[in-house]
């Protein structure tokens, strides 16, 4: 099992789309996205119901993509919305850790590390993935809280002015460190899954590595992402192009008038309009275009949406039979999973890219090639082999002892010859 030959520079970033195009990695993200989406969907519909909007109204206006902030909601409904968002984000970060582990194993030359093995690793190491962000948030809250406390001291008559002026440099450097910690918090959101998935750090180790990477590699972080993000967008665009034309080919063949004909148009048109609602997407694009913040990009996007529906979505008559409705429901589930696979592939590219980046950072900053390390699974395998070897030795020693005892008993049982 030989590790992959890396250059440990920017050239390795271009490997990300190819390594990410793996059913194993996309499946990990797809599973996490389904779990996160279901939680988000349910909590948003509950939030809308608590705000007086019925399920039918929400489904008619927002369908599969609810957002409680589109109506006036109570604080409790807002809380439900953000809980749904956080659950989805946590699910994505845990999936990032699993994919980082698979990528790390792949870089080490192990192509047979499965998604089940990756999820077992995540179940064992989920604490630093979650609590690193909590720790960073608490550090920020501590410094902001201390600043507010000293600001209260500044309100003391006569004495407050001096309590502000004399330790001003302390306040200043504390403020600078708080800004730096806020930047580190953003970096930790990106790199914690890679840190945990490769070098198996705990919460304190992940926090330390986040500070270290931010301090020692700031320009590489920026430069590598300038390359990775457009590369991810281009790769997902090609991925979508291939899948959409596969979708169109199915419609062309099955929708021929001598085959399914109008029946397919009804099924696929209904399913596609549910998963990709033209009215909702067009209204969002038009709202963005009218806001003036997108510099005409949204207007182009609105035209491209119309071209997409004209090219790929068959027109439905609107009246479906019972069996056609059931078939449209099933096809809609598959189309929605295909839609999530686009997002999952994008996340897979980012996760693989961040894992490669962290491998480069460790080599550049500490001259530490983490691909040469023995990870915990390898150490466990060695321990198991040692235990088996010791067990075999014990068995052989026991067998030798039994043979020796048998020989002794046979010797004792023999009658000495009479001379």
Image (cartoon, helix red, strand yellow):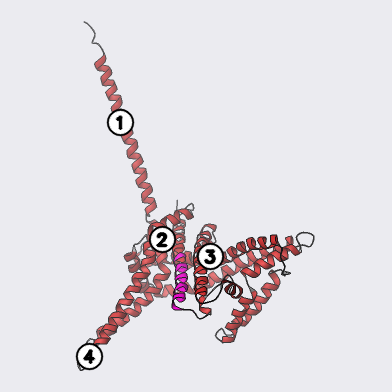
Q: Residue 348's x, y, as percent?
A: 51, 64
- Front residue of 382/10: it is 382
Query: Which residue appears at 32% of the width and 74% of the height?
Result: 139
Q: Nearer the viewer, mark 1 or mark 3?
A: 3
Q: Earlier in the sequence, mark 1 or mark 4?
A: 4
Labelled pair 3, 2 in contact (Cβ < 8 Å): no
Dominant secondary-structure state across the stretch colored magenta? helix
Q: Earlier in the sequence, mark 1 or mark 3?
A: 3
Q: CA distance from mark 2 to mark 1?
A: 43 Å
Q: CA distance from mark 3 to mark 2?
A: 18 Å
- The verdict on residue 74 being magenta is yes
Where does label 2 land, which residue? Answer: 197
Where does label 1 land, which residue? Answer: 398
Q: Residues within 10 Å of mark 2 (few under 14, many from 20)?
A: many
Where does label 3 land, which residue? Answer: 344
Q: CA distance from mark 1 to mark 3?
A: 56 Å
| Label 1 element class | helix
Q: Nearer the viewer, mark 3 or mark 2?
A: 3
| Label 3 element class | helix
Query: Quick check: 320 above or below 183?
Result: above
Q: Is residue 212 visible?
A: no
Q: Earlier in the sequence, mark 4 or mark 3?
A: 4
Seen as rendered, the residue at the extreme right is 258
- The verdict on residue 199 being magenta is no
């Amino acid at each position: 099992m030989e590790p992959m030959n890396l250059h440990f520079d920017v050239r390795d970033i271009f490997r990300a789309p190819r390594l990410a195009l793996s059913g194993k990695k996309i499946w990990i993200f797809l599973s996490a996205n389904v779990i996160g989406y279901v939680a988000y969907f349910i909590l948003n519909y509950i939030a809308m119901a608590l705000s007086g909007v019925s399920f039918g109204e929400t489904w008619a206006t927002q369908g599969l993509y609810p957002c409680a902030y589109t109506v006036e909601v109570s604080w409790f409904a807002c809380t439900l919305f953000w809980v749904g968002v956080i659950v989805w984000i946590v699910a994505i970060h845990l999936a990032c850790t699993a994919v980082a582990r698979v990528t790390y194993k792949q870089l080490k030359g192990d192509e047979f590390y499965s998604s089940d093995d990756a999820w077992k690793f995540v179940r064992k190491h989920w604490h630093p993935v979650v609590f690193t962000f909590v720790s960073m948030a608490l550090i920020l809250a501590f410094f902001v809280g201390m600043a507010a406390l000293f600001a209260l001291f500044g309100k003391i008559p006569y004495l407050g002015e001096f309590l502000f002026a004399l330790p001003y440099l302390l306040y200043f450097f504390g403020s600078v460190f708080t800004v730096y910690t806020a930047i580190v918090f953003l970096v930790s959101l990106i790199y914690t899954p890679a840190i945990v998935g490769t070098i198996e750090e705990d919460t304190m180790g992940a926090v330390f590595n986040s500070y270290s990477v931010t301090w020692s590699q700031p320009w590489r972080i920026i430069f590598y992402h300038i390359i990775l993000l457009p590369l991810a967008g281009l790769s997902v665009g090609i991925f979508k192009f291939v899948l959409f034309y596969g979708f169109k080919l199915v419609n062309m063949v099955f929708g021929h008038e001598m085959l399914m004909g109008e029946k397919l148009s009804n099924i696929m048109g209904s399913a596609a309009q549910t998963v990709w609602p033209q009215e909702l997407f067009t209204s969002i694009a038009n709202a963005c275009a009218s806001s003036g913040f997108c510099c005409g990009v949204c207007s182009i996007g609105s035209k491209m949406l119309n071209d997409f529906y004209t090219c790929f979505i068959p027109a439905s008559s609107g009246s479906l039979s019972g069996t056609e409705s059931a078939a449209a429901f099933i096809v809609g589930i598959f189309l929605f999973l295909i839609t999530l696979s686009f997002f999952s592939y994008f996340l897979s590219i980012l996760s693989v890219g961040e894992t490669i980046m962290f491998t480069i950072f460790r080599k550049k900053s500490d001259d530490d090639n983490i691909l040469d390390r023995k990870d915990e699974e390898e150490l466990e395998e060695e321990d198991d082999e040692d235990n088996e070897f010791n067990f075999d030795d014990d068995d052989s020693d026991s067998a030798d002892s039994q043979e020796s005892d048998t020989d002794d008993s046979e010797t004792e049982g023999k009658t000495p010859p009479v001379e």
